[in-house]
Image (cartoon, grey):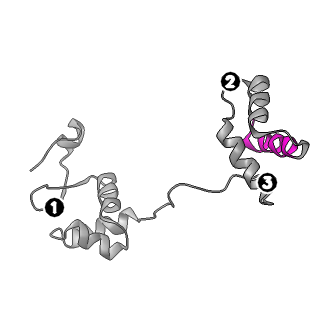
Amino acid sequence: MEDLNYHVIYEYEFHRGTSAAETARSINDVYGCDVVKENTMRFWFQRFRSGHFDLQNKPRGRPEIKVDNEKLKAIVEADPSQTTSEVAASCGVSDKTVLIHLKQITKILREKNRRAVTLRPRLMAAGNQNIG
């Protein structure tokens, strides 16, 4: 069953005056153990008490970071002596994001001087090898 369907049940039970704990037990009895946790019910009931009856889940998690891998590749190939910090600053992202995207475009960083280098096909086939 989709989350929205459960949320309708939550709201229904809230309006009936059922407690969060009792609602969680009832739902788990009908739909299976641990379909909903009591803490989740408390969260939803608190939302309803605050007057928020929007049943859609709020977006959460990390925002999607968009780095154009082709642009990143061009930046690195234009000046391979740049550090990850310099590349990150020119792209407007964090060093970690640059590292993730460099790995995606088969680039790695030498640990000694943290400069970008291209992986050789032989090393790519062997997996993650320490180059340094």
The secondary structure type at the circle numbered 3 is: helix
Q: Which residue is mark 3?
A: 48
Is the Cβ of the residue at disc 2 closer than 8 Å to that at disc 3?
no
Residue drawn 72% across the image and 23% down it: 32
Residue 64 image point, x, y percent: 50, 60
First-in-chain label (1 vs 3) = 3
From the viewer's side, name the closer residue of 19 and 98.
19
Residue at the outermost bottom position: 90
Instruction: Describe residue 78's horizontal placement relative to residue 60 as left or right.
Output: left
Q: Quadrant of the N terminus?
A: top right
Instruction: Describe residue 52's horizontal placement relative to residue 99 as left or right.
Output: right
From the viewer's side, name the closer residue of 126 and 98.
98
First-in-chain label (1 vs 2) = 2
The numbered dot on residue 33 is: 2
Residue 59 image point, x, y percent: 62, 56
The stretch drawn in magenta includes residue 8: yes
Magenta-drawn segment? 1-14
Q: Which residue is mark 1?
A: 114
The stretch drawn in magenta includes residue 83: no
| On screen, residue 43 above or below 67 | above
Report the amino acid beneath label 1.
Answer: Arg
Spatial distance from mark 1 to mark 2, Cα to Cα? 50 Å
Is residue 54 visible in this depiction of the protein? no
First-in-chain label (2 vs 3) = 2
